[in-house]
Image: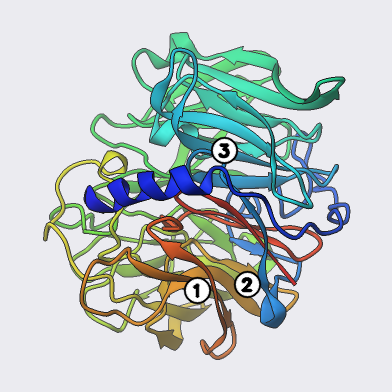
Amino acid sequence: MGTKPYRLLAALLAAVAASALIIGQAPAASAAPSGVPGLGPKWTSLMHGDLASTDSTAYRGPGRTGHLAAWSVPGGPCAATFIGSDSLPVSLCTNVIAGRPPQFATPVVTLFDPATARVLATLPLAKGGLLGGVYGYLDDKNRVVVADGTGAILKVAHRRTARGWQLFVADRIDLSRHLGADSVTGLAPDESGRIWWVTTAGIVGTVTGRKVASMHLPRGEELGNGLSVRSRGVSVLTTHALYEMWAGSDGVPKAVWRKAYDRGPARKPGQLTWGSGTTPTYFGPGGDEWVAIVDNAVVPRLHVYRSDDGSPVCSLRAFAQPDQGTENSPMAWGDSLVIPSTYGFQYPPMAVRGPAVPPDAPFVGAMTRIDVAPGRCTRVWESRDRMATLPRLSTADGLIHALGYGPLTPGPQQLGPVNYVAVDFHTGRRVVTRQVGVAPLDEPLQLTGMIAPDGALWQGTFSRMLKIAR
């Protein structure tokens, strides 16, 4: 992203921090229970929407009447937002300066007012991996379950006191003897209530009650994404291979199968690590019979495997257009996948690992829908949409909701209008374009939004939390 946008952002933040919040709305409706032990409401408790990482929801989004209804300045970008059964949004943010003593890029659990988006409470955490722990989830007690830099899994609860709202650590599970100097990058529960976790350097572990167990994947295989869970397995993607894993009564994870993929000659511009940037997506017949990833080959390909045994279902060039790649998880609906391209997107230097080849590239944008059948992947449409967030696919309204840029123009990438956009899943046509911000103040950073039961899209940007509502 370079340094000049950050200098401009600092000046803008000084002016914005004192601004009043705008237009309040009624609190969101209650969310549906997930039915998974230890997991919070359905569709609003995980960064990728559900345990299968489909990045889809059964709630309608803002759609054609969507507009910026409220916003606040939480102190830094919020990478994951959850909506509890109490309708309160709570986010995992990375504040520019936070903690005691103050530190740069500190992870902060942040609670928001559901009507005004005002910050109600914050709790800084010890710094860990992946910008302080991007991947967490909301449990069935509305607690944020996240790993911190001390080598522990925390369950962060909220309560209202005489002095206002408070966030506090309600439970702590120590993983330090399994980690050494490593750090947890992602965690998720399975349907038995067991917590799975993975680390940057390739440790995969579980927590059953208070019992912790772990194993180490081959040396040199790193993880920069989350993990996906189904009833009979857990999908883990390293910088070299895709694994289907499970654990017995002792809790020690074991590989059911492994599939190496083409990781290409180097990290691509617009990706965080040298390897696939996708969190695996379970989808297909029965909801999880297949698992999909996109590799990091010079010409990246979509690969779909059978979840049980790793046998191939189909494979296809991920994008018809040249010079593409993705750091984002494929969205899924039935037997269809939608893949957004991030090739050329400029992430902050602190977020990436290793040099890119080429060092940079224009973010021309692309998004494609591919339908899957045994032995055949078929491209349905491909657009030049420049999605600047990981989109959310609504199966209720048939729209793909995100923040995006306009057409590529000469000059710096992250300067200019930031729009709320909605794209028709069936045709790939954009049906909504409405400005909600200006970059670099509202640079979306490929962050993930969350659609609440009332249809509001809660979306973090570099400096603000936006509530986009009908």
Q: Earlier in the sequence, mark 2 or mark 3?
A: 3
Q: Earlier in the sequence, mark 3 or mark 1?
A: 3
**Residue type highlighted by circle 1:** Val
Which one is nearer the viewer's eye here, 235 or 117? 117
CB atoms of marks 2 and 1 within 8 Å? yes
Task: Name the mark nearer the viewer: 3 or 1.
Answer: 3
Task: Name the mark nearer the viewer: 2 or 3.
Answer: 3
Residue 180 in picture, x, y percent from top left: 37, 12
10 Å crowding of disc 3: few (<14), some (14-19), many (20+): many
Residue 163 in picture, x, y percent from top left: 81, 21
Q: Which mark is residue 333?
A: 2
**Residue type highlighted by circle 2:** Trp
10 Å crowding of disc 1: few (<14), some (14-19), many (20+): many
Residue 40 in picture, x, y percent from top left: 77, 41
Numbered disc 1: secondary structure = strand
Residue at point 70%, 72% (across, down): 62
Whether residue 338 appears in this view of the structure is: yes
